[in-house]
Image: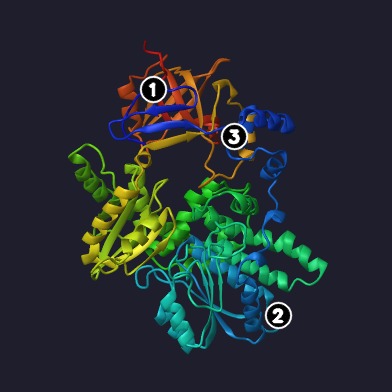
């Protein structure tokens, strides 16, 4: 959201525009089939706004609404539909039977570390008790090795007697590593979810498992890396579940247990929380209530997540995931794998506390870099008062490589532009990028990389998705990158792409925000990327008292209720200077507002009860006439 105040000009009940000195923001209602919403409300005896929310998200049939409210493991697609699965399962079974040494080649983020744990655990499960599987793993060091499989690691593995390498959350563009594995006589199985190279295709390997690859019949294409590894684990364990009792135990006990980590990765990796991903998240969150595994239990405790209920997706995304990621950002990610594998409560507590300390270090490092970023952004904006209609590219040799992705996200939040953020080391620029709706960042990097007449390719390596990328390039090519990205942005940026849109789900009469309504909302969770938490709008609400400023940064408004009393509406100043907004709008008791908000339940002592979290507000139309 923008940082400065503006006025809301109504254009009818469905669309409104909020103007600011920084950039335009449009309020846009999602399309709703009123008849379908009425039918759902009648079928489920739920509040009509809940039914409208479901319809706004494409859940309009009674059968699909039943599945939405009651996700089950039966909705998970058969892993055997993934191209390459049969070959991979047969090769791993042979390796286990013959006592071969298997290396799992992971990655250093939540997705890669949890995928490593899942696959290692599954392979060990299928081995005979008298002949345990020989499974090793390698999680790269972010600074010393960087992203992806490295030839040296493969060479060391070959010397150590490894004969089968399985990548998780990496490898789909590892052409050189695949060639090295072949030269070393190593069989390679690639499991990944990142987008393949449209031109080069996929690396030469014994099997490649990735729903995003060409000709893969798997019906859901947006799994995270850990979910792809889980599919391989599922197929492996299914292959040895021969009796009805074994299959029932697999479906009802083992797979739900595995889904705990898959849910964490799915939420942390910000893949779209729709379709199969929503089922994975819902089932996994349910299993996270009071976990038995010492590492997961200790981590939830240091993250101050209650163990007597399933955590929310927000708690996983903002409390668990940052602590898991902190290991790879600030130290060694193998600590995460050890945390989730150990059965020793004392070691688990020690590792969980270490991750907590590393997360504190990460936050301090991030805060220092943000000061420098704010200074660079101020210079960009100084001439015209607006950020350029471009991809924002920032670099500083002092920034820590472990926080570049977070910094890029902060720049996107601050500017409403796609952003590439880099640091430098020994002549190489290493960076991360994040994007906005309507601008495919990986496609943009691919276009920037293409050689032209007498022009060499820009990047040493790059990869990712439409909204998130990682890359490296020689530092002396940074000017070329800026020039090429500016040209690409000029061609591909639609004018609308730089106008921030605030999509809300349902317009509510404020009297409809009740305990029953909130209880139904909780049944619609989990929410995340691609399936955001429902945003509501109420118009013409009245302030019961003047705004209260909290810690000079945040605000608390008391909004009158029609039956008497008021409800708190909190404005947390992450991207909006709420106190300044209130001052410019001259808010006071009796002010009439249009507000956009989330519905929350505060569980904190004397403040317990329903409250709102403000997303935007403005003076109601006609209230000052």
Residue at the far front: name it: 453
Q: Which marked residue is nearer to the observer: mark 2 or mark 3?
A: 3
Q: Nearer the viewer, residue 273 or 331?
A: 273
Position of the C terminus by quadrant: top left
Position of the N terminus by quadrant: top left
Residues at marks 1 and 3, CA–CA distance in whole angstroms: 24 Å
Using the rendered view, name the quadrant where residue 614 is placed: top left
Residue 154 x, y percent position in the rendering: 45, 82
Q: Is residue 615 visible?
A: no
Residue 227 located left or right of residue 569: right
Residue at the far left: name it: 383
List the residue tagged with mark 2. 129
Q: Is residue 339 visible?
A: yes
As helix, strand or loop, the secondary structure at mark 2 comes to loop
- Mark closest to the chain's N terminus, 2 or 3: 3
Residue 309, above or below 603:
below
Q: Which marked residue is nearer to the observer: mark 1 or mark 2?
A: 1
Residue 299, above or below 476:
above
List the residue tagged with mark 3. 53
Residues at marks 2 and 3, CA–CA distance in whole angstroms: 51 Å
Which residue is depicted at the point 24% across and 56% down?
Answer: 483
């Amino acid at each position: 959201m923008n940082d400065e105040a503006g006025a809301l000009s109504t254009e009818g009940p469905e669309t409104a525009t909020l103007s600011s000195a920084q950039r335009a923001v449009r309020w846009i209602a999602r399309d709703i089939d009123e008849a379908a919403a009425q039918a759902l409300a009648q079928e489920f005896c739920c509040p009509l706004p809940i039914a409208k929310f479901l319809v706004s998200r494409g859940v309009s049939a009674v059968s699909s609404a039943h599945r939405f409210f009651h996700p089950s493991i039966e909705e998970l697609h058969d892993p055997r539909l993934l191209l390459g699965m049969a070959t991979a399962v047969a090769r791993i079974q042979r390796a286990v039977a013959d006592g071969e040494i298997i290396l799992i080649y992971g990655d250093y983020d939540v997705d890669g570390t949890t995928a490593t744990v899942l696959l290692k655990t599954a392979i060990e499960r299928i081995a005979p008790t008298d002949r345990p599987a020989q499974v090793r793993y390698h999680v790269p060091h972010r600074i010393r090795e960087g992203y992806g499989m490295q030839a040296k690691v493969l060479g060391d593995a070959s010397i150590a007697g490894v004969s089968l390498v399985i990548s998780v959350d990496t490898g789909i563009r590892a052409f050189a590593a695949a060639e090295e594995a072949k030269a070393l006589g190593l069989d390679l199985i690639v499991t990944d979810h990142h987008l393949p190279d449209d031109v080069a295709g996929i690396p030469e390997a014994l099997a490649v498992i990735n729903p995003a690859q060409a000709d893969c019949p798997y019906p859901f294409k947006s799994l995270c890396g850990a979910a792809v590894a889980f599919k391989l684990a599922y197929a492996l364990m299914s292959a040895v579940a021969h009796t009805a009792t074994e299959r029932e135990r697999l479906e009802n006990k083992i797979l739900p247990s595995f889904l705990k980590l898959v849910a964490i990765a799915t939420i942390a990796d910000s893949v779209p929380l729709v379709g199969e991903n929503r089922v994975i998240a819902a089932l996994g969150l349910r299993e996270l209530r009071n976990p038995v595994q010492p590492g997961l239990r200790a981590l939830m405790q240091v993250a101050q997540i209650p163990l007597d209920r399933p955590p929310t997706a927000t708690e996983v995304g903002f409390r668990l995931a940052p602590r898991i990621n902190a290991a790879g950002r600030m130290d060694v990610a193998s600590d995460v794998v050890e945390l989730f594998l150990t059965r020793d409560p004392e070691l688990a507590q020690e590792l969980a506390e270490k991750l907590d300390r590393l997360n504190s270090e990460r936050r301090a490092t991030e805060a220092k870099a943000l000061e420098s970023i704010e200074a660079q952004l101020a210079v960009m904006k100084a001439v015209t008062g607006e950020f350029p209609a471009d991809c924002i590219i920032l670099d500083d040799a002092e920034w820590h490589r472990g926080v570049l992705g977070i910094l890029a996200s902060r720049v996107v939040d601050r500017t409403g532009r796609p952003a590439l953020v880099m640091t430098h080391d020994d002549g190489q620029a290493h960076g991360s990028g994040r994007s906005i709706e309507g601008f495919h960042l990986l496609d943009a990097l691919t276009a920037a990389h293409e050689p032209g007449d007498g022009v060499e390719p820009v990047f040493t390596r790059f990869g990712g998705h439409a909204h998130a990328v990682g890359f490296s390039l020689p530092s002396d090519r940074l000017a070329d990158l800026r020039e090429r990205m500016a040209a690409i942005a000029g061609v591909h940026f639609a004018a609308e792409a730089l106008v921030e849109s605030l999509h809300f789900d349902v317009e509510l009469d404020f009297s409809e925000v009740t305990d029953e309504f909130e209880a139904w909302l909780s049944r619609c969770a989990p929410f995340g990327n691609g399936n955001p938490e429902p945003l509501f709008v109420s118009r013409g609400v009245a302030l019961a008292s003047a705004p209260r400023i909290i810690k000079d940064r945040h605000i608390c408004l008391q909004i009158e209720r029609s039956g008497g009393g008021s409800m708190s509406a909190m404005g947390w100043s992450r991207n909006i200077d709420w106190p300044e907004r209130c001052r410019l709008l001259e808010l006071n008791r009796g002010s009439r507002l249009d507000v956009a908000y989330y519905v929350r339940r505060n569980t904190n002592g004397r403040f317990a009860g329903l409250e709102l979290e403000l997303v935007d507000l403005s003076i109601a139309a006609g209230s000052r006439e």
